[in-house]
Image (cartoon, grey):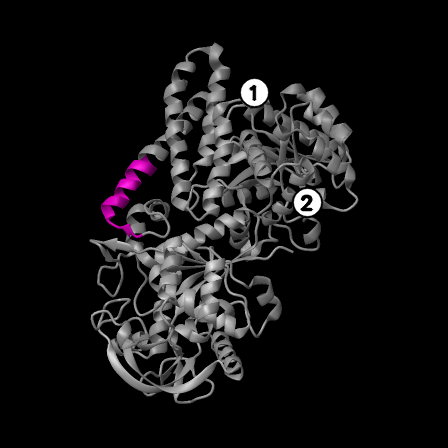
Amino acid sequence: MAKTFYLTTPLYYVNARPHLGHAYTNVLCDTFARYHRLRGEKVFFLTGTDEHGTKIEKAALAVKKEPRQFVDEIVPQFKDLWKLLGIEYDFFIRTTDPAHKRIVQNILRDLEKKGEIYKASYKGWYCTPCESFWTERQLADDKCPDCHREVQELSEENYFFKLSKYQSWLVDHIKTHPDFIRPENRRNEILGFLREPLEDLCITRPRARLAWGIDYPSSKEHVVYVWFDALVNYVSAVGYTEDAKKFDSLWPADFHLVGKDILRQHAVYWPIMLKASGLEIPKTVLAHGWWTMAGTKVSKSRGNAVDPVELVKKYGVDALRYFLLREVRLGLDGAFSEDLLAERYTTDLANDLGNLWFRFASMLEKYFEKRIPEIKAGSLESAGELKTFRVLFQKVTAEVGQLDLREALEMIWALVTDSNQFVEKKKPWVLAKDPAKKGELAEALVILGESRSWTRPRSGLSLKFMPFIDTHVHLHFPEYGEDRDAVIRRSREAGVDLFINVGTDRQSSLDSLKLARQNEFVYSTAGIHPHDAKEASDQDFQALEQLLHESKVVAIGEVGLDFYRNLSPAETQKKVLSRFFELHRKTQKPLILHVREAYREMKEQIDSELGPSVTGVMHCFSSDAETMKQFLDLGLYISFAGPLTYKKNDPLREAFRACPLDRLVLETDAPFLPPQTQRGKRNESSFLLETARLGAELKKISLEELGERTSENARRLFGL
């Protein structure tokens, strides 16, 4: 079983409200989390808050509050910001959590038993803002070498961790593992620091000086040093010493994302703490730069903090996320000004991308009744533009894999520019005047539609990694209840881009449309399931016909013939299906056809009533390749669901292999028919990836290509 990809942000100090720097770190980490989810990987994304220490205690006293009350009031501000920015973390840890406190103490007891901790008197210089001790020779002009603020001389008895014991080991590890610290300039910085002898780490503070902290297990007179406490969160959040199964499935972390100012703690203290505890160390510590204003770091302590909430109110979430990822290369400092953000918003998003979308949508509405036109299968396979799109996918994913988000976005924006130039070159408005060039016009808009899908904003990162479309799901069914939003979120994280939410009777179709109106990722259909054909009335058909004029209702369905259970008489089912065929001719909306134990009868009825003019899809196809070919010859698409993965279903797998890629779509039929490994559970769209993985193997293509091709087909079929 593949290990879950585990990534973390640092814990944020809660002595004041969150600012732009916090937003930047979490947007970066969220982007990488989404990338790995969209590649079909399981992801565990951790963030949280650091709530102990001198600064917290002083900040609480300044407003005449107890530290616990103070942090309880600040923490929700961080959670609210992450919700606002669309940060989809898996766990939020607080260092005041009881489990975290227990695990910190467990680790300290273990280190004491191993002889890694000793008690001694200490005299040195203490920096309150950094919560760090320094020797006199480490000071820079008698000030803290990190933040350059005043320090105070202290002499006290404390507990020390044998950091110096592991210096040679750490240097060797950094030199032999070039990806352990990234980027390279930060790796060199740490190696430079390690040329000087390491001092053992003071890991406690006297309770007489600091009461707000975790009790040191061997002394009532001491509390745990805030950095030792905070670093342990990366293992306490995943159950170390308390939940071995969970811990083994997640550790070691794949990467810690941190600001460059706290790299030393993460690249020196933390790996040595883990080594002394007998644990593997993280694979990568990635240090990003600062946002600066007038050359000075943006931070609350310097009084120049930028409020991301106000920026979102003015420019929107997508614009802010885009700016943070595009403006600066990861690892370097970036200069912030609202003028730069406004320029990106206007030039990149409104003028370049917005103009492309507007032109495409306007032409589609004017020339093809808001639907992506049908073109001859394979007619564009040699089109240079489509080849460019597919090569771009490989290049973009390579850049993200190398942690270069700015370069990935620059590649995508080059496509935006090229697409706008393509419009000027093709001049669709001129082609539209000549009926003989209708086919050329259709091809031009199909190419533009493909360009549009590659540059569609996705919570601030316009990367089309592997978006699938679930072409048949029932999200409005009561099986989802209160966790419907969570199901949609999980499914989008897994890589399902859009949902065709299928109605099964008049009320069901109304409920489906209501959900679609509430959610931009959901489209609706209108129909009556063959099981309910005997209940269909003229009023139902009148209501459904009205629904089919709604822009978010993209198909007629679920309709068809089901002779397996015969819950409605066969002749009644055929009569009801005939009325839907009439609506199909009238509205030109595609059909979603349910067929069970009635493939011959369905073929005969289509031949006699619609002929070759039918447009639609065979929902949850369950027969063999020979039967499938009859419906392919009619021009229908074929949809495969969870049963493809079932044991002893070789005929269906052979049909999948034989199905042309340009006529293939995927679905879940959730909450029904989960794939093999999920049988017995309620199905959901996130499980589509299991069917897709098997499908890619059967087709001997990549998962990415299957996602790309089936999504193209679904967009073309439903006019998305």
Say left or right for 342 vs 390. Answer: left
Task: Specify the amino acid type for callout 2.
Answer: Gly
Residue at horizontal 31%, vertical 55%?
Answer: 308
Q: What residue span does the magenta drawing correspond to?
A: 333-350
Q: Measuring from the top left, give residue 366's x and y in whole percent.
A: 42, 22
Is 342 contained in the magenta span? yes
Residue 593 vertical placement versus 670 (above, below): above
Residue at horizontal 69%, vertical 52%?
Answer: 677
To which quarter of the image does residue 381 belong?
Answer: top right
Q: Measuring from the top left, give residue 704's x and y in whole percent.
A: 57, 39
**C-alpha span from label 1 to label 2:** 31 Å
Callout 2 secondary element: helix
Callout 1 secondary element: loop
Circle 2: is it few (<14), some (14-19), or many (20+) Cα within 10 Å? many
Quadrant where the N terminus sits is bottom right
Q: Measuring from the top left, give residue 332's x and y in whole percent.
A: 33, 51
Q: Nearer the viewer, residue 332 or 416?
A: 332
Is residue 653 among the parts visible in the rendering?
Answer: yes
Is residue 233 among the parts visible in the rendering?
Answer: no
Residue highlighted by disc 2: 642
To which quarter of the image does residue 223 belong?
Answer: bottom left
Is 371 contained in the magenta span? no
Say which mark, if any, is on residue 229.
none
Residue highlighted by disc 1: 379
Circle 1: is it few (<14), some (14-19), or many (20+) Cα within 10 Å? few
Residue at horizontal 48%, vertical 16%?
Answer: 440
Residue 177 vertical placement versus 406 (above, below): below
Say left or right for 114 vs 570. Answer: left
Q: Measuring from the top left, give residue 352's x and y in whole percent.
A: 34, 33
